[in-house]
Amino acid sequence: MTTAASPQHPYRGLHDRAFWSRSVAAGADAVLPELFRPKFQIDPQDRIATAGSCFAQHIGRYLGRMGLCMIDLEPSPPGIAADIAEAHGYGLYSARYGNIYTTRQLRRLVEEATGERTVLPEEICWERGGRWWDALRPNVEPQGCESREEIVGHRKHHIEKVSQLLNELDVFIFTLGLTEYWTSVDEAIAYPIAPGIIAGSFDAQRHQFRQLSQGEVVQDFLAVMNSLRRWRSGRPLRVLLTVSPVPLAATYSGRHVMTATMGSKATLLSAALELAGADPLIEYFPSFEIVANPWFGNHTFAPDKRSVTPETIERVMQVWAGSFNLEILPPRPIDLKDRPALADRDAQCEEFLTDIFSRRL
Amino acid sequence: MKILLLGNSLMGCLLEAYRPDTHLLGHEVAFIVVPGADGPDLTISGDRLYARDANQFPHNRPFCWPSTAWLEELKNQDSVVIGALGFLDDPQFQGASLLGRFSLPSFRIRDDLVNPPPPVSRAVAAASLRGQWSVQPGAVFSRKLRQVYSGRILVMPYPAPARSTLTDRRCHLAQIYEVPSDAACFFEALRQAWLKDWCQVHQLDLLDLDIPAPDNPFTPDHLLATDRFHMAPGLSDLILRQVHRWLA
């Protein structure tokens, strides 16, 4: 008499993380430690640069608290309180480029910083009420500047620093935020916000709305990687991609903002996974999945259903820290009596302004 | 009235110019002078003043007149004059200058400037300068003094720059800017605004020196010492007379 052996199949022997019933159904505590297994490590001596949509600001803040070497080539001048510095684009990212929502915006910045593209002052200087803004990072000077010449002077310095940054970094962390954007008709310029909201004015003859496809997102990022390799003479870099879980503040696609959000995030997720799957030096970190899922309860977003709660950000970064064997150190003490605005500061976000201004107009 | 005048080397200028038979008549006057680039570096414990260890910091060795001034408790003073607040630039010690830490492209930057400081907007410059002025030793001391001393506190600001600093290449104004006078007017307006705000918030009385005039933010050259930083006897005399008027 013989006993029938259990049949062999590909799922036999897989880790619990591969099965819904043994992981997600068991709750967040069972999921999070196994959610992400990076294919490369980040060492304390690695020089790290961050960029991306406003969610990336949270990542940068936490990475500093993990004892990692965060690059900041455009630090705040001395004496400025942290909230005022952040309102002027200091300390948010590795250079003062503000939020980079789309891969097209990132591609254009890298092309400019590596000398592959020249940006003319008339293309990027926005005026309102006699004051001037850099159209490619309008939020870094909330009150604008005195003149077009001043904008050009600031941008020259900024691009020099971005050039230096692209050469110095070992790890680049980029958070993909949007697929919708506004561009010049020749598509040479990718704006972070529609002309006319902060400054400048919309002109249908000069500006157009664009929506990036999954393939275009991939192509943009591959172009970025090629530019970086040339600029760095082939010296390798590691890339960590994330997708911002923050919903769109507004859409021009004609669809409902919720379906536009889900479509945009699906496009970005698909592109990020494709990029990470094709290159051993590009990794994808699932911050989007930790926040924007229905399985960890209803407390990941604030009452506005858009801002990610501090507890959820902490949860995201705990997963990050655990995956890279790092520890999150306590934040630097803040004197709340002197600077109350620091306690509840929001991420600086041009996209949010799109919603605010559209209601005022 | 018992008056204590304390401060850094600029207060030393007042001490040098002070004549008991001419200035602050009717008052019992004492000076404590602790040299230091951007205000008196003193601490307060209980009701007494303490300077840094003179053996460890010989450049900050305090001078007192009369020599017993150091022993007097603060509560015995009717008024205190602090000098100086609002340090901005010093042609002798460029490392200490606030103006060398950034450049303002809204004022034309010199073409021949080899390594210009990082460019900032006027709004960022204002926030940076206000923050730096607020943590200079003189400002910190004035805030602490206000917390422990209920009498009247008069604040003597640094004099505005001389017009001749605009062509002195040791000064950052002349080093950085093509038209230094425009930048100087901007910085001086910022400084005056900060001084007024600081004194209002901390309930201090600001001596406005009556110099310069609002439409001419420069101290006449003859009122500054040859280093263009300290006060010449003429300006010290004017300040002592103004203190006298404020106390009347």
Image (cartoon, grey):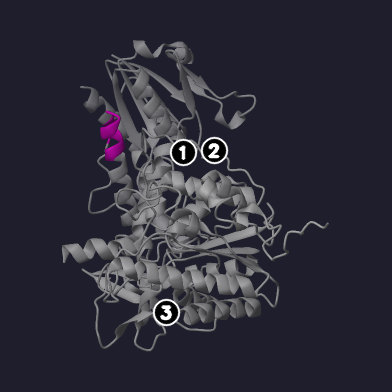
Few, some or many residues within 10 Å of mark 1 (<14, 14–19, 20+): many
- What numbered label is drawn on residue A330? 2
User: Picture quarter containing residue A50?
Assistant: bottom right
Residue A348 lies left or right of residue A320; in this view the side is left
Q: Which residues are magenta?
A: B196-207
Q: Chain of mark 3?
A: A
Left or right: B5, with A323 as reference point: left
Q: Identify the chain of the residue marked 2, using the numbered disc in the image.
A: A
Q: Label 3 belongs to which residue? A: A212
| Residue A101 is at least partly visible in this image | no
Q: Amino acid at mark 3?
A: Leu
Residue at 30% of width from left, 17% of height from top? B150
Does residue A93 appear left or right of residue A282 in this picture?
left
Looking at this view, is A29 or B86 the one in front? Answer: A29
The dot on residue B38 is 1
Judging from the image, what secondary structure is the residue with disc 1 in? Answer: loop
Closer to us: B10 or A309: A309
Other-residue count near label 2 (Cα within 10 Å), few / some / many at <14 / 14–19 / ≥20: few
Point out residue B120 in the picture as x, y percentages from the top left corner: 41, 60
The alpha-carbon separation of the residues under discs 1 and 3 comes to: 55 Å
Q: Which subunit holds the residue at mark 1?
A: B
Task: Pinpoint residue A197: horizontal percent, then vertical percent.
Answer: 26, 69
Residue at the location (22% across, 27% down)?
B245
